[in-house]
Image: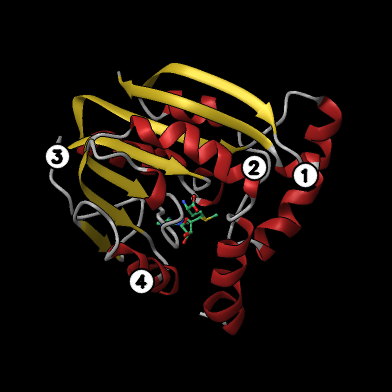
Amino acid sequence: MGLYSKYVLPRLLDFACRNKDVSDLRRQVLPAARGIVVEVGIGSALNLPYYSFDVTHLYGIDSSAELLQMAQKKTAAAPFPVTLLNQTAEKFSLEDHSADTVVMTWVLCSIADSRVALNEARRVLKRDGRLIFLEHGLSPDPKVQSMQNRLTPMWKRLAGGCCLNKKIDGLISQGGFAIKDLQNCHIPGPKAMTYVYRGYAQPE
Ligand SMILES: C[S@@+](CC[C@H](N)C(=O)[O-])C[C@H]1O[C@@H](n2cnc3c(N)ncnc32)[C@H](O)[C@@H]1O
C-alpha cells in the first residue's frame, strides 16, 4: 500500500464525508436501522451519532485499518455494542441471516464488484431484513453523465476506487434486492459527485 492510500486518503475520505448536506441525509435515513446492524464500509464511523436506540449491536466492516482506527475512537460513546471488523464487503465473517439491517452509505461507488458485495449483504440479512442505502451515482442528466464518464478514470485513482457513474438502483436490483423506497436528489456541490440515491431494499 502506498503512502497516499495509507496516510492521505483515509483523512481525505473522512473530511469529504463530514459535509453538512451529507450529514443531513444521514440524519434522515439512519434512524430506520434496527436490531443487529451491519454497516458495510463503515469508514470513520460518521453514521454512529444518527443511529437510534432501536439498534442492539452494530458490526462495522471496512477494508481500511486506518479508517477503522478513527472509528474505534468513537465507539466508546455509542449506546450499543460496536464490533469493528477489518474485512471486505465481498466477504465478511458474520453468520447467514443474522442481521436485521445492512447499511451502505457512500460505499457502493468504491466497491469494485458491487454484485459480490450485495450478495454478501443478502447472505447476512434476515429474510425480512432491510438494506438501507445512501449513495451517490449516475445522474439522469446526459450532460452530467458524460462528465461523470469522463472524470471517473482519474477520480477513481484519487478517491480510493470511487466511480462517479454507477447506477445505484440498477446495481441493488441486480444484487437480488427488491427496492421498496427510492428517492433521488442533487445535493449542493459539483454536479458529477452529488446525485444521490437513498432508500431501502429487501432480499428478493
Ligand atoms: C467514502 S468512504 C464512506 C465511509 C462511510 N460509509 C461513510 O458514510 O462515511 C468509503 C468507505 O468504504 C470502504 N471500502 C471501500 N471498498 C471496500 C471494500 N471492498 N470492502 C470494505 N470496505 C470498503 C473504504 O475503506 C471507506 O471507508
Residue 36, x across and y down, in percent: 19, 41
Is ligand 1 less than 8 Å from the beta carbon at label 4?
no
Q: Residue at x 42, y 71 (%)?
A: 70
Side of 30 where 77 appears, left or right: left
- Three-letter amino acid code at the position of disc 1: Gly
Is ligand 1 less than 8 Å from the beta carbon at label 2?
no
Mark 2 to mark 1 CA distance (whole Å): 9 Å
Mark 3 to mark 1 CA distance (whole Å): 39 Å
Mark 2 near mark 1, Cβ–Cβ under 8 Å? yes
Mark 4 to mark 1 CA distance (whole Å): 29 Å
The answer to which of 3 and 47 lies nearer the viewer is 47
- Three-letter amino acid code at the position of disc 3: Asp
* For marks 4 and 1 on the same chain, the one whose residue lies earlier in the sequence: 4
- Looking at the rendered structure, the secondary structure element under dot 3 is loop
Can you say whether 11 is above or below 178 in the image?
Answer: below
Residue 120, x across and y down, in percent: 29, 42
* For marks 3 and 1 on the same chain, the one whose residue lies earlier in the sequence: 3
Side of 23 where 101 appears, left or right: left
Q: Which image quarter is the C terminus in?
A: top left
Q: Residue at x 25, y 42 (%)?
A: 37
Mark 3 to mark 4 CA distance (whole Å): 29 Å
Q: Which mark is residue 21?
A: 2
Kindly report which numbered mark, 3 or 1, lies closer to the viewer in this rendering. Answer: 1
Q: Which residue is mark 3?
A: 96
Q: Which residue is mark 1?
A: 189
- Three-letter amino acid code at the position of disc 2: Asp
Can you say whether 160 is above or below 130 in the image?
Answer: below
Q: Which residue is mark 4?
A: 73
Side of 132 where 21 appears, left or right: right
* For marks 2 and 4 on the same chain, the one whose residue lies earlier in the sequence: 2
Q: Few, some or many C-alpha atoms within 10 Å of disc 2 (few <14, some 14-19, many ≥20)?
A: few
- Looking at the rendered structure, the secondary structure element under dot 2 is helix
